[in-house]
Amino acid sequence: MHDTVITLRGRLGGDVTLRAAGEAQVASFRVACTPRRYQRRSDSWVDGDTQWYSVNAWRALGDNCARSLRRGDPVVVHGRLEIRTWTNQAGEEVTSLEVEATSVGHDLARGTTRFARTPRSADPEGAAGAEPDDLVGRGQQAAVEDRSPAA
């Protein structure tokens, strides 16, 4: 296959929406990526234009995204890039960049998070042999504590 694979580093523009698509769950969210460049002339960092990407995450990945991600979270998204062009109601041609995610996670360069394993279907409780600390946060949102300077 000749897919275009991309890795994004940015922030969630809104909360994740979860919907059913046939028998599968799909989570959708938007990621804003703003490049920063250092300019020697002014000895300062300058923000470039923000690029927005729509991201779709299917099945278990989508469910985990809905449980873990919140608006403003720093994320890293890896997946296949698709460029869609259509005509809107005003008759204007619109192009959007969409990513079908294969991996999504918090950007640990921007803060910390705590991982909670998803219980396996063979072990519905997911607690067999788990340490008490492993159960903290199971099924709950992963918290990100931002310790980076304001960006």
Image (cartoon, rainbow, N blue to C red):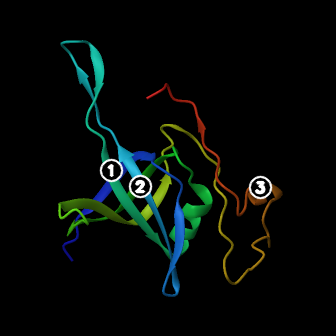
Q: Amino acid at mark 3?
A: Val
Q: Amino acid at mark 2?
A: Arg
CA distance for labels 2 and 1? 7 Å
Q: Is residue 46 above or below residue 51?
A: above
The residue under the point 30% across, 22% down is 45
Q: Position of residue 63 (x, y in %)?
A: 57, 69
The residue under the point 78% across, 75% down is 125
| Residue pointed to by mark 1 | 52
Q: Is residue 74 above or below residue 58?
A: above
Q: Furthest-bottom residue in view?
A: 23
Q: Amino acid at mark 1?
A: Trp
Q: Position of residue 59 (x, y in %)?
A: 51, 76
Determine which of the numbered discs, if any, sits on residue 136 in the image. Answer: 3
Q: Is residue 17 left or right of residue 4?
A: right
Secondary element under disc 1, as helix, strand or loop, is strand
Determine which of the numbered discs, if any, sits on residue 30 in the image. Answer: 2
Q: Earlier in the sequence, mark 2 or mark 1?
A: 2
